[in-house]
Image (cartoon, grey):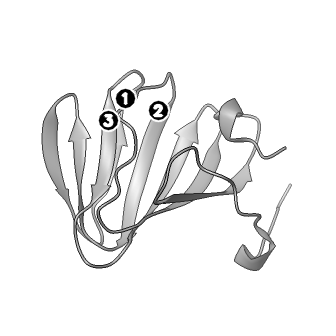
Amino acid sequence: MVEHLAYTEVPDNAADHDGFEQHVLLYSYNQMLTHNVIEPGAESPYHNHPHEQIGYVVSGTGTQIVDGEEYELTPGTCYLLDSGEKHAMRADGDEPLEVLDIFHPVREDYIPE
């Protein structure tokens, strides 16, 4: 099955903290693609989950904190987070930090209602 979706068709998903915008783009029974925008100075909560996560920085600059270690994020940076790794992301520059994330398996808590 092939599925196509225009970004203009993607609903805004409410995030549970200020300065963080998330859009679930597509998902199947075992994978999910999200688009995230973190406003300058904002940070995602430090958290972990049982999902593997692969990400790509589209634009902006920031810092990713993984198990207490800090890593620089710039456009073109890719990252892989194993299941259970504690992590957060902060937008450091004057522009929003924009990232694409793929989760396996699907994050049930992200599925739009």
Q: Residue at x 39, y 46 (%)?
A: 44
Which of pointers 2 and 1 lies earlier in the amino acid sequence? 2
Q: Is residue 57 left or right of residue 52?
A: left
Residue 11 spot, x, y in % from top left: 77, 64
Q: Distance between the residues labelled 3 and 2?
A: 12 Å
Q: Nearer the viewer, mark 1 or mark 3?
A: 3
Asked whether disc 2 touches disc 1, contact meaning CB atoms under 8 Å apart, the reply is: yes
Residue 79 spot, x, y in % from top left: 31, 49
Q: How far apart are marks 1 and 3 (CA)?
A: 10 Å
Report which residue position mark 2 lands on: 52
Q: How crowded is mark 1: few (under 14 residues within 10 Å), some or many (20 or more)?
A: few
Q: In this view, does 77 lie to the left or right of 100?
A: left
Report which residue position mark 1 lands on: 82
Between 26 and 93, the one lying in front of the other is 93
Q: Residues within 10 Å of mark 2 (few under 14, many from 20)?
A: some
Residue type of the residue flagged with mark 1: Asp
Residue type of the residue flagged with mark 2: Glu
Residue type of the residue flagged with mark 3: His
